[in-house]
Each structure stands twice: as C-alpha cells, then as structure tokens.
Image: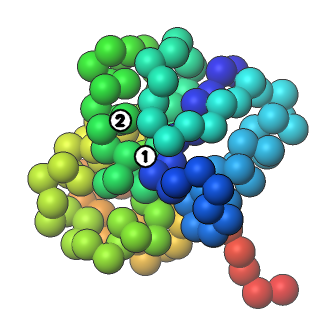
Amino acid sequence: MRIELVHPAPQGITTGNRVTALRWAGIFRELGHEVRVRREWSGAAVDVLVALNARKSGEAIRRCAVSSPTTHIVGVITGTDLYERLDGLPEMRETLELSGHIVTLQHLAAERLDPRLASRVRTIVQSAPS
C-alpha cells in the first residue's frame, strides 16, 4: 500500500509526533508498504493517509477527504489532542467525523470520544511497563 503519514512537528524535532511518525513509518516499511512522511498532505494519490495529531493535522484530513474520497483516512489522537476536550472544538469534531478510522494512544482517550465514533476507534498503547 501507499501510505502518507502526516504530522505537525517541525523538521529536525526529535521528540513527540515526529518520532512517532518516523517509528510508524519504519514499521509500515518493514511490512512492505511504501511510506512518505510529511508535515502536510502532499495531494499525491495514496491508499492511506495517517494523520498524527488529529486536531493539528485537521487541514490535511479535510483536504484529503475532499480531494481523494477513496483514500482511507486514519486520524490519530496524540497527547496534545488530549489537552482539549475531545468533542469541544468544532474542527476536532469535523476531523474525527472525516476519519474512517480513529486511533488513540491510550484507553482513556477512547473513553472521552463521542460514543457514536466507537466502532471506528482502536487504541494502540505505544509503551507499557515490562
């Protein structure tokens, strides 16, 4: 599959969403997928758009949904998304509605979402005590 992974972090940052983007890109490549990591959606034809930080990557989600309706969109709720009430911002509600799949990085985030989105939500815990 052709996957474009977008994140809001500036080039060269070595923490947060950029690190997650690079880590996930490596995993997708190991699974045999073609992956591009960008700060914004390029507009290129891809099978899947993975948008880290669903709020800050909202423009990429909106543009992709309008321009490429067959692309599967995965909105990922990351740490800074949780600082806001998840359903409190109109743009956040819109990006979650446009995302065919929603990933949270902790179970509590999934519990804070509108119950109508529950069938599209999956939690991927990135780290756990050993």
Tag 2 and tag 1, C-beta contact below 8 Å: yes
Seen in the image, is 4 located left or right of residue 19? left
Q: Residues within 10 Å of mark 2 (few under 14, many from 20)?
A: many
Of residues 11 and 97, the one nearer the viewer is 11
Residue at image x 44%, y 18%? 43
Circle number at residue 101: none
Residue that sits furthest to the bottom in the current view: 129
The residue tagged with tag 2: helix, strand or loop? helix
Which amino acid lies under the numbered mark 1 shown in the image of this protein?
A: Gly
The percent position of residue 113, horizontal first and vertical second, equals 30, 63
Q: For marks 2 and 1, give the CA distance.
A: 8 Å
The percent position of residue 121, horizontal first and vertical second, equals 44, 53
Q: Quadrant of the N terminus?
A: top right
Seen in the image, is 35 located left or right of residue 47? right
The percent position of residue 10, horizontal first and vertical second, equals 52, 54
Residue at image x 70%, y 30%? 35
Circle number at residue 75: 1
The mark nearer the N terminus, 2 or 1, is: 2
The percent position of residue 30, horizontal first and vertical second, equals 87, 38
Residue at image x 71%, y 50%? 22
Circle number at residue 61: 2
| Relative vertical location of residue 103 with respect to residue 5 in this rendering, above or below | below
Total marks drawn?
Answer: 2
The residue tagged with tag 1: helix, strand or loop? strand
In this view of the protein, can residue 121 be seen by the observer? no
